[in-house]
Image (spheres, rainbow, N blue to C red):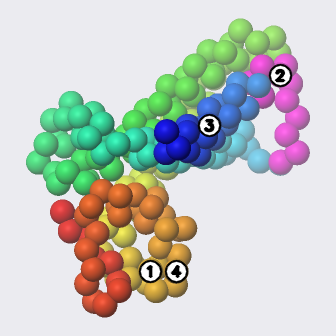
Amino acid sequence: MKQHAFRIFGFLLPPLAYMAAIFWVSALPNPQIGVKAPDYLLHALEYFLLTLLLIRFFLSLPHAILLNLASFVPCFKKRAATFRAWHAACLLGALVSMLYGVSDELHQYFTPGRHCSLSDVLADAFGSFLAYGIALLDYWLLARTSVHARLLHHLKLFGRCSYVGEWIPKTCCLTKAHGSYPTFVE
């Protein structure tokens, strides 16, 4: 029960609160943001962060659920189980974020003083795909190359700098090698 409550408040609540904040700002007729930056850059950053929060939530789901979701994608079947689950979480995070971006633009279409724009949807999708790519790079750097994992472990930053550092040990793929440094196997 305690773990379930932590999953809800620690992993599900942040993306939902962030989505509610996006909805609230989109409902304003003429939002004034104190940052002087191009609109497309703000959209990309906004959905980059949303995608990272969603990936974090999907990685908190049980490993078996992610593997079942990954089984629907034919190209995933030849990959190792850990990578399939990781990739499924990243892909789900990006897809949900992009769908929310489309719904946000539709919401703005019906908001007085706002407009719906395809360039905003493309900027949202770019931010989502950028977060997706960085999450996959995170997996590759820390789960596939032990040099980076050893360095972060030695600096005591392993679980703080990466989603992999928090997630891989839970999947029973962590073995001890080179003294106390982690090496990942599948």
Q: Are marks 4 and 1 in contact (CB under 8 Å)?
A: yes
Q: Are marks 4 and 3 in contact (CB under 8 Å)?
A: no
Name which residue type carries label 4. Answer: Lys
- Reading the image, the residue beneath label 1 is 153
Gap in angstroms between the C-alphas marked 4 and 1: 5 Å
Gap in angstroms between the C-alphas marked 2 and 4: 44 Å
Q: Secondary structure at mark 2?
A: loop
Report if residue 160 is visible in the image.
yes
Gap in angstroms between the C-alphas marked 4 and 3: 27 Å
Q: Secondary structure at mark 4?
A: loop
- Reading the image, the residue beneath label 4 is 156
In this rendering, is residue 1 above or below 146?
A: above
Furthest-bottom residue in this view = 179
Residue 160: x, y in percent?
54, 67
Gap in angstroms between the C-alphas marked 3 and 1: 29 Å
- Reading the image, the residue beneath label 3 is 13
Q: From the viewer's perspective, is the residue at label 2 or at label 4 nearer? A: 4
Count of labels in the image: 4
To which quarter of the image does residue 180 belong?
bottom left
Residue 107: x, y in percent?
66, 15
Q: Considering only order in the chain, which callout, 3 or 4, is on the residue closer to the N terminus?
A: 3
Local packing at callout 2 (Cα closer than 10 Å; few below 14, some 14-19, many 20+) is some
- Residue found 50% across the figure and 25% down from its top: 99
In this rendering, is residue 92 above or below 109?
A: below
Gap in angstroms between the C-alphas marked 3 and 2: 23 Å
- Reading the image, the residue beneath label 2 is 28
Question: Is residue 51 in the magenta section?
Answer: no
Q: Are marks 2 and 4 in contact (CB under 8 Å)?
A: no
Report if residue 11 is visible in the image.
no
Q: Secondary structure at mark 3?
A: helix
